[in-house]
Image (spheres, helix red, strand yellow):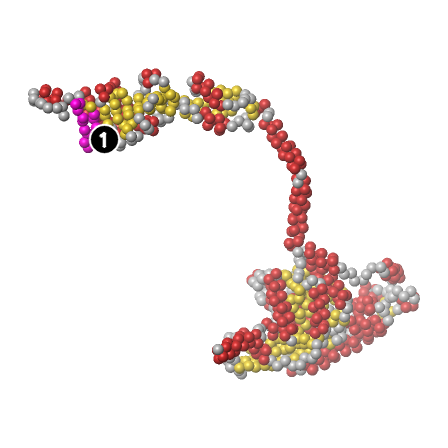
């Protein structure tokens, strides 16, 4: 039978083990048997387990420190100026490179004297960096010229500022009081004119506000091509309707609305009846349903004499 | 008494706040060890369907996320004897548990075993005002129970309605909404020494924790040690702790009696220490390693090295046989069990329909105890282990943790107490206001 000592639980006394056991209490003498956290350690651990505190400590504190250091550094004005100076200096240095310098202006699509005027208007002190060019402002300055319809500015390679001009084409001559001006098809002023005879090829209009109705005037001129040799021009009446003035002081008064149609009807009547060649002063088309003719002062008597009717008394 | 009523109500509010935060700590302040568990509540319906256990004891609702134990110091007979030592021990346990759970807890539910608990059965009855039992009527009937003289300096720890009777029907668990004329109620009241409770609360407060509830250790170890049918049919739980042995009798899932014997495992240890003239630590080690209560002839030949570091060779090489050790332990264990038997007899335990006795607690781990207990307490004795709780570490599943686990269950499913109902006297000001109004009407 196995002795009881062989069982692992009831080992017989081991001398070596006992010796270490004897030494151990002496080594442990200085150690407290029941360690417990101090009040402050306990509170710190609880504080550290608080979610708000953790977030504040791990995110809020670093952010605060960085902001504090940055704020202290930037509190001095000279430091701030130095910092911005460094930055703007770098930007300036980059923009002043010769690759971005503009030194020439080429104007295209304009007559030589207009080109000169445009160069004068640009007022750019070249050479200049393309970053500093105010292209929008320059374009507006050029388009402020009456003779320029649109302008297109672009910086081409090689430091050339290209200005593409579309000129206004004069289509009408407008006399307003003493002034004589040329208008384009939209009614915008192109240039002044010293005398009507400088441009006899352009039709003449007159009257206040005639330039606002330039498009209608041009339409009327094309319709009235048949009587062009007799036409002196169009007169704007009351800024609302047109009068056609012919030679022999004849006048065709057109309505406010549907003036072209009325004129077409009159041209057709003229072709059929040779109306305008007769001795009349005015054709009044203002009322569409009732055109009115005004005869010359002696015309009625002439007609009666021709018909063999004796007349007496005054003209009227 | 109203002071205690108010403070218990405040604890109930604190418990509600803890439930809302979802984290609460369990603190079992015992004589030999202090255990701290940290529970996380998942809300009422989490994990109900999937685990398949169903609502058994409500254990699916919470999870243990931190556990720590430390050797208790400054506690004798389950009562705090040295205040700052106990505070340090509580701090140690709570800190370790918090570190494991990695969460901060502010609310604590504590239990203790000492303070000489005494049970009282109260009865009260009222005539119902409008023949329907409402919450207020229950408050009234609970207030109508005539409170016995519980003695100077004693306070009520538990006051649980055990049974309701409506007219001639008795055994009602929840009479609310029922119709009758006369409502009667039986209440179980457990009183303890007030100073002990105050000491414990003060200790916990010194650790920056809020108390969300206090329970008797005998009661909560009964909750975890007894299985459901034992609680229903009637059983006694004997929680053999280090410094005191708690006794609780359950019937119809209510505790109907509780008492404590001021003896426990530590007394066995001190007997060994005195009998063999060895230090307490060595005696404790020998007790847990070689202890027992039934000597056989084999034990005569089994020699135990006692050891020692006195430097005297003869003294340090002493050996005792296991029989001698058993001879020292057995009378003390017998004494404890006899004392428990006396308490059970006094409570009228033999009249219960079922007389199951469950032994739990750290001292119930002595080999052969169930045989000895069967001789003294009756045939129906078993050794109980606490229920299994989700997330509980393996080291904390032994019978020594019965009250800690029971306290977890108690935290999840508290029993209705007297202070959960409004006292009808709170309606009294309304009546006096009416009287004042009447006086005005008559005189002006």
Residue B73 found in image quarter? bottom right
Mark yes or no: residue B395 visible. Answer: no
Would residue A290 be counted in the magenta stretch? yes
Task: Count the numbered circles shown.
Answer: 1
Residue B323 found in image quarter? bottom right
Residue, x 23% and y 21% (percent of image)? A249
Q: Nearer the viewer, residue B174 or A197?
A: A197
Q: Which residue is mark 1?
A: A286
Q: Chain of mark 1?
A: A
Q: Position of residue A172 (x, y in %)?
A: 33, 22
Q: Position of residue B13 (x, y in %)?
A: 61, 67
Q: Nearer the viewer, residue A221 or B386?
A: A221
Q: Nearer the viewer, residue B57 or A198?
A: A198
- Residue closest to the far front: A313
Residue A229 lies, with reference to residue A287, above or below; the image says: above
- Quadrant (top left, top right, bottom left, bottom right) of the C terminus of chain A: top left
Mark yes or no: residue B324 visible. Answer: yes
Say left or right for B131 vs B370.
left
Would residue A7 be counted in the magenta stretch? no
Mark 1 crowdedness (10 Å alpha carbons): few <14, some 14-19, many ≥20: some
Residue, x 84% and y 73% (percent of image)? B274
Q: Which residues are magenta?
A: A282-297
Q: Nearer the viewer, residue B7 or B192?
A: B7
Element type at marker 1? loop
Q: Position of residue A284 (x, y in %)?
A: 21, 28
Say left or right for B287 vs A294.
right
Residue, x 61% and y 61% (percent of image)? B22
Residue, x 63% and y 61% (percent of image)? B23
Q: Position of residue B242 (x, y in %)?
A: 75, 71
- Quadrant (top left, top right, bottom left, bottom right) of the N terminus of chain A: bottom right
């Amino acid at each position: 039978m196995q002795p009881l000592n062989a069982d692992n639980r009831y080992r017989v006394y081991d001398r070596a083990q006992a010796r270490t056991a004897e030494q151990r209490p002496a080594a442990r003498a200085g150690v407290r048997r029941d360690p417990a956290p101090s009040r402050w350690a306990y509170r710190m651990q609880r504080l550290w387990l608080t979610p708000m505190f953790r977030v504040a400590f791990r995110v809020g504190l670093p952010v605060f420190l960085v902001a504090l250091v940055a704020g202290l550094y930037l509190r001095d004005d000279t430091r701030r100026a130095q910092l911005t100076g460094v930055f703007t200096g770098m930007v300036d240095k980059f923009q002043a490179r010769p690759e971005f310098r503009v030194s020439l202006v080429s104007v295209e699509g304009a007559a030589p004297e207009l080109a000169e005027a445009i160069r004068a208007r640009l007022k750019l002190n070249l050479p200049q960096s393309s970053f500093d060019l105010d292209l929008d402002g320059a374009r507006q300055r050029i388009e402020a010229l009456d003779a320029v319809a649109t302008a297109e500015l672009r910086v081409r390679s090689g430091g050339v500022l290209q200005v593409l001009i579309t000129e206004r084409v004069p289509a009408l001559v407008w006399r307003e009081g003493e002034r004589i001006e040329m208008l384009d098809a939209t009614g915008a002023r192109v240039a002044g004119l010293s005398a009507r005879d400088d441009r006899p090829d352009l039709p003449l209009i007159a009257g206040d506000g005639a330039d606002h109705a330039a498009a209608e005037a041009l339409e009327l001129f094309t319709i009235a091509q048949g009587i062009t040799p007799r036409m002196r021009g169009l007169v704007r009446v009351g800024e609302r309707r047109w009068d056609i003035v012919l030679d022999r002081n004849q006048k065709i008064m057109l309505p406010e609305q549907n003036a072209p149609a009325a004129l077409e009807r009159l041209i057709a009547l003229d072709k059929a009846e040779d109306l305008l060649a007769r001795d009349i002063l005015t054709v009044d088309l203002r009322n569409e349903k009732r055109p009115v003719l005004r005869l010359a002062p002696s015309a009625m008597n002439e007609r009666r004499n021709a018909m063999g009717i004796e007349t007496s008394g005054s003209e009227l | 008494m109203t002071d205690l009523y108010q403070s218990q109500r405040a604890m109930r509010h604190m418990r509600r706040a803890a439930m809302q935060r979802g984290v609460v700590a369990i603190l079992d302040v015992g004589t030999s060890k202090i255990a701290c568990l940290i529970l996380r509540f998942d809300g009422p319906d989490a994990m109900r369907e999937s685990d398949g256990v169903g609502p058994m004891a409500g254990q699916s609702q919470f999870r243990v996320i931190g556990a720590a134990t430390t050797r208790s110091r400054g506690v004798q007979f389950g009562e705090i004897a040295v205040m700052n030592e106990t505070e340090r021990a509580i701090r140690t346990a709570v800190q370790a548990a918090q570190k494991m759970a990695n969460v901060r807890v502010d609310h604590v539910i504590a239990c203790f075993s000492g303070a000489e608990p005494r049970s009282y059965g109260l009865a009260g009855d009222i005539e119902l005002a409008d023949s329907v039992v409402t919450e207020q009527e229950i408050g009234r009937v609970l207030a109508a129970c005539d409170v016995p003289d519980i003695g100077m300096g004693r306070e009520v720890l538990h006051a649980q309605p055990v049974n309701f009777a409506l007219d001639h029907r008795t055994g009602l668990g929840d009479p609310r909404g029922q119709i009758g004329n006369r409502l009667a109620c039986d209440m179980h009241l457990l009183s303890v020494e007030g100073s002990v409770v105050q000491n414990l609360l003060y200790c916990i407060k010194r650790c920056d924790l809020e108390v969300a509830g206090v329970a008797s250790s005998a009661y909560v170890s009964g909750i975890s040690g007894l299985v459901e049918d034992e609680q229903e049919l009637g059983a006694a739980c004997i929680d053999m702790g280090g410094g005191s042995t708690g006794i609780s009798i359950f019937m119809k899932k209510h505790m109907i009696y509780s008492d404590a014997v001021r003896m426990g495992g530590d007394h066995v240890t001190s007997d060994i220490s005195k009998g063999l003239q060895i230090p307490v630590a060595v005696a404790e080690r020998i007790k847990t390693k070689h202890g027992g209560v039934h000597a056989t002839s084999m034990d005569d030949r089994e020699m135990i090295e006692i050891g020692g570091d006195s430097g005297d060779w003869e003294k340090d090489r002493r050996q005792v046989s296991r029989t001698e050790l058993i001879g020292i332990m057995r009378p003390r264990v017998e004494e404890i069990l006899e004392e428990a038997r006396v308490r059970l007899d006094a409570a009228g335990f033999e009249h219960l329909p079922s007389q199951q006795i469950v032994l739990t607690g750290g001292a119930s781990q002595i080999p052969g105890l169930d045989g000895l207990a069967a001789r003294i307490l009756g045939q129906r004795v078993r050794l109980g282990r606490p229920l299994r709780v989700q997330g509980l570490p393996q080291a904390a599943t032994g019978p020594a943790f019965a009250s800690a686990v029971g306290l977890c269950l108690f935290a999840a499913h508290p029993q209705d107490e007297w202070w959960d109902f409004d006292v009808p006297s709170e309606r009294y000001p309304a009546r006096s206001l009416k009287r004042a109004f009447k006086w005005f009407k008559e005189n002006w």
